[in-house]
Image (spheres, rainbow, N blue to C red):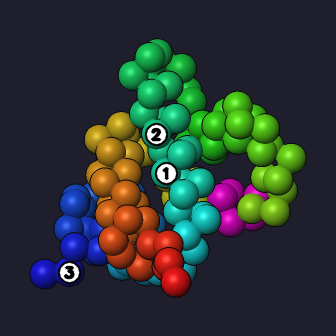
Amino acid sequence: MTTDLVTYYGQTPIIDQLLDKYGVYLEKLDRETKLMLRMALATYVFTQEKDSSTKHTVADALEDALSNIGLLVSYPLYKNLFENVCSVLDELTTLEAEILLEALQHQIRWGNARQVVN
């Protein structure tokens, strides 16, 4: 069994849509995009657990995370990609976000998005 596979961690209709669009290993997303998505999902989970009554989206969480570290200015470079990714994740639950966080963490550390050290 290949543990890079997102579906190794969980399978939901929203995750299926993401896999259909970006590949079963999310191979169409590069390392930097996966790092930013991980940051957005972590912010999303934190925000939802802090106050689940608000309608905070993954796109909102990404904007919050980028502005908190002073990178919001760089966001236009990724705007189209993240609008497309975030549109798939629009109704994401915190459980689904945690599933994706596990998969992204594995891919960033061990899988197809790991940093290659020479």
For marks 2 and 3 on the same chain, the one whose residue lies earlier in the sequence:
3
User: Given the current orientation, which residue lies at the most extreme left position?
Assistant: 1
Residue receiving disc 2: 42
Check if mark 2's residue and mark 1's residue have beta carbons within 8 Å: yes
Q: Residues within 10 Å of mark 2 (few under 14, many from 20)?
A: many
Q: What residue is drawn where x is 66% and y is 58%?
A: 82
For badge 2, the amino acid type reads: Ala
Instruction: Measuring from the top left, give residue 72's x and y in whole percent.
Output: 80, 43
In space, the residues marked 2 and 1 are separated at their CA atoms by 6 Å
Judge whether 69 appears above or below 96 on screen. above
Instruction: Measuring from the top left, give residue 46's x and y in whole percent.
Output: 45, 28
User: Which residues, given as a range, are shown in magenta?
Assistant: 79-83
For badge 3, the amino acid type reads: Thr
Q: What residue is drawn where x is 82% and y is 53%?
A: 74
Q: Name the main secondary structure of what is drawn in magenta.
A: helix
Viewed as shown, does residue 2 lie left or right of 94? left
In space, the residues marked 2 and 3 are separated at their CA atoms by 24 Å
Say which mark, if any, is on residue 38. 1
Q: Is residue 68 magenta?
A: no
Count the labels in the image.
Answer: 3
Residue receiving disc 3: 2
Viewed as shown, does residue 65 lie left or right of 111? right
In space, the residues marked 3 and 1 are separated at their CA atoms by 20 Å
Where disc 2 sits, the SS reads helix
Viewed as shown, does residue 18 lie left or right of 4? right
User: Given the current orientation, which residue lies at the most extreme front position?
Assistant: 118
Q: Residues within 10 Å of mark 3 (few under 14, many from 20)?
A: few
Where disc 3 sits, the SS reads loop
User: Can residue 115 be seen in this snapshot?
Assistant: yes
For badge 1, the amino acid type reads: Arg
Nearer-the-camera pick, 69 or 60: 69
